[in-house]
Image: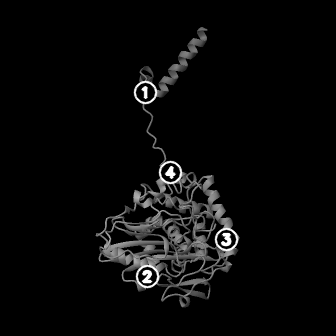
Amino acid sequence: MRRAARSAMVLAAIVAAALGPTACAASARPVRHAAPAVRPPRAIPALGSYAARSVGGPLLASTGTVVNQPAGQGTPLPNVPASAWVVANAATGQVLAAKDPHGEYGPASTLKVLTAVTLIPRLDPNSMVVASQLATSQQPNSAGLITGRAYRVADLFRALLLISANDAAVALTEAAGSFATGMALINGEARHLQAYDVVAKLPNGLPAAGQVVSAYDEALIARQALNMPAFMAYDQTLTSQFEVKPNDTETLVNQNYLLTKYPGGIGGKIGWTVSSEATYIGLARRNGVTLIVTVLHCTSLQEITSAEQLLDWGFAMNGKVTPVGTLVPPLAGTPGSGAAPAAIAGTAHSPARVGNSRRHDAAGPVTPAPGPSIGATGYALAAAGAAVAALGLSGLARTRRRTAAAQPPGNSQASAGG
């Protein structure tokens, strides 16, 4: 017993010497330290919930037209053939008027704006991307990418935004590390922008079950695009040369005629599929005022005309009507870091309710590198989109490619995800 006690005393002395006098003092006088505060993850509103539909203000939860304009005063609000739209001041964030702003609809190719906003900061424009079978199997294969050939990132972004290239969208998404990683980043960027009505399954906006956006959320995405000089440079390019393969170069012509036909037009993106009908994001600036207009589920070939009418009203009534809501700012922090993976993977929307019970869709730069890790939900969401794309979307074979000759002056766009 004496020998054991002596051993214990020697061991205690050795430990005390190793820990130093501070530890000894602390053991003599225990101090209870408060546990560091842990900020709980930000709750993400469930798709279709009142919390999601009222982002930006309670009036924006309406499924009808909302505007604070006395009857008979000022320029009348146009009645455009679209199920949902938003007109907002990009600088102040004021939503001047809206129709079903949080209603969920198929995005068609307007989703490519979110794809570009997400990936432009992450990809070196001069790096090369090898086109995969998944990318080249997209229908229509707008840029004509060839499996196994390498293409410059900057050229792919121009193809994405000028001619709405579905194959370029997939190639750029895979350049983030993998298709699953790229899709997780795209949905994570939507959460970062507080665009809680967005469910992205395919980066090109081709029909996919459960893929939806809202007019309000597309306005948030458009405002982010306006703040990215690289995006605007791509988006405002009128023509560009694209080398499909050696000795085979095509001229890409910007399909957004707002740039050349509308006074003050500075950018935007068109879209159309059978299920989504016509969709549009438009950007215009006059006398120092920059407006955003978004249009969803519009009568085909009327989307840009409708946007022009809404922009005309917005420029006439900006500062003269009381806003009906505001574009909320992005969340603090960099998307894709910190809590972003949880937001990407673990906060998928509840499928229980979709808008107004109507879903209008079937179904410093770095070189391309894997993005942040994501959870199983994020991978499953992206993998499902990949499976749809890999099938070639054969149902789109019945769709039509709309060319300039078949449209009102200058309105040229692709049919499927155009």
| Sequence-first disc among 4 and 2 | 2
Expressed as whole percent of the image width and height from the top left, the position of residue 189 reads 50, 61
Quarter-of-image position of residue 246: bottom right
Where is residue 245 shown, x and y percent of the image? 62, 83
Depth check: 408 or 173 in front? Answer: 408
Between the C-alphas of marks 4 and 2, the distance is: 38 Å
- Of discs 1 and 4, which sits in the foreground? 4
Q: Position of residue 288 (x, y in %)?
A: 30, 74
N-terminal label among 1 and 3: 1
**Disc 2 target residue:** 258
Q: Secondary structure at mark 2?
A: helix
Nearest to viewer (mark 4 / mark 2): 2
Amino acid at pointer 1: Arg
Identify the mark nearer the N-term, 3 or 2. Answer: 3
To which residue does mark 4 refer? 339
Q: Residues within 10 Å of mark 3 (few under 14, many from 20)?
A: some
Identify the residue position indicated by label 1 in the image: 32
Confirm or deny contact between disc 1 and disc 4 (CB under 8 A).
no
**What x and y, as percent, mark residue 247?**
61, 88
Amino acid type of the residue tagged 3 in the rendering:
Leu
> Which residue corresponds to mark 3?
134
Which image quadrant is residue 203 in? bottom right
Mark 1–mark 3 Cα distance, whole angstroms, equals: 58 Å
**Whether residue 178 is visible:** no
Residues at circles 3 and 4 in contact by the CB criterion of under 8 Å:
no
